[in-house]
Image: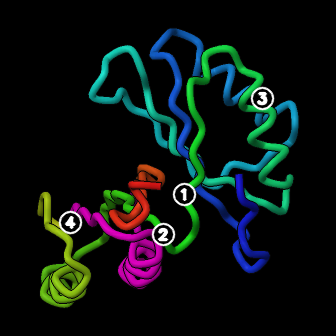
Amino acid sequence: MNVPAPEYRYHTLVVKVENRSGVLARVASLFARRAFNIESLAVAPTDDERFSRITVVVDLESAPLDQIVKQLNKLVNVVEIRELHPGHAVERELMLVTVTAEPNRRDEIVEHLDRAGGKVLSVGTDHMMLSLVGPPGRVDDFENLMRQFGIVELQRTGRVALASLDDVAD
């Protein structure tokens, strides 16, 4: 396992685990016991129902990457761990957000949303529910932009990622 360049504080690990009850709790408990900071966590079954895929973005200021990987490898239900090198992965995140949207400001909100590549999900009397899927930086920027309108409720999924096609054969 290669250690990332020092300028990368956050690093993405993909952990293939057995799809069994309690596995996620054991992984989360390992991070808590060792005081490893998780920036983002996403879990879902894979195309093979025997396994799940955990995409975890770790903060390397809390522990060295090799230490995190060694501790994960000790868990019995962990099948495989892959690191996705920063800059060599396609990363996406979903955000759902409800914002205050007075009728005279809706066009402005929609203009920002169109530029970001998002969608309007619902329009109420004085609120709009929006969605955006994109790289984490774009989602961060859009979230910050929506603050001026008044965020009523916000939910983000956490990062999901795949190795860039050039790196798949590695």
Q: Which callout, 3 or 4, points at the residue further toward the start of the chain?
A: 3
Above-or-below relation of 57 to 86: above
Q: Position of residue 37 (x, y in %)?
A: 76, 50
- The residue mark sitting in front, 2 or 3, is 2
- The residue mark sitting in front, 1 or 4, is 1
For numbered disc 4, what is the local secondary structure? strand
Residue at the disc numbered 2: 88
Residue at the disc numbered 1: 84
Query: In screen coordinates, is 44 left or right of 23?
Result: left
For numbered disc 1, what is the local secondary structure? strand
Q: Which residues are magenta?
A: 127-154
Is residue 145 on the magenta stretch? yes
Residue at the disc numbered 4: 128
Pointer 1: residues within 10 angstroms few (<14), some, or many (20+)? many
Q: In percent of the image, x 57 and y 69: which residue is there?
A: 86
Q: Position of residue 53 (x, y in %)?
A: 45, 33
Instruction: Assess whether mark 2 and mark 1 are in contact (beta carbons under 8 angstroms).
Output: yes
- The residue mark sitting in front, 4 or 2, is 2
Pointer 4: residues within 10 angstroms few (<14), some, or many (20+)? many
